[in-house]
Amino acid sequence: MTLSRLAASGRVPGAKIGRSWVFREEELSGWLQEEIASQTAERSHPDTATTAFNEAPPLARKRGRPRRRLPILTTTA
């Protein structure tokens, strides 16, 4: 479901054929490598925009440990 939503928004390479999404393994692999490199670079530089994310208050949950806010991911095309 997540991959379909990302493809529908244009963030992941894919095509909709009829009612199904089709993904080429080579294109997804390349996109994933770029995404991993981008996120790793963001985490390794503490003075980037993710600093504000890390200082944001956690989201409330009904029970258990509170969740942290997730950063908004951007793709490089």
Image (cartoon, helix red, strand yellow):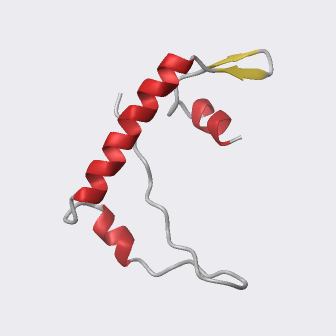
Across the whole image, how many numbered discs are drawn on residues? 0
Q: Residue at x 29, y 54 (%)?
A: 42
Residue at x 47% of width, y 26% of height: 29
* Camera-side residue of 24 and 5: 24
> In this rendering, would 3 be left or right of 37?
right
Residue 75 visible, this orientation: no
**Could you say where residue 4 lies in the image, as x and y percent from the top left?**
67, 34
The location of residue 62, given as percent across then percent down, is 72, 83
Relative depth, front residue between 57 and 24? 24
Q: Quadrant of the N terminus?
A: top right
- The image quarter in which residue 16 lies: top right
- In this picture, is 42 found above or below 53? above
Corner quadrant of residue 56? bottom left
Residue 14 appears in view:
yes
Image spot of residue 54 (x, y percent): 37, 72
- Quadrant where the C terminus is found in the figure: top left
Which residue in the rendered view is the most extreme toward the top?
Answer: 17
Residue drawn at x 35%, y 49% as measured from the top left: 39
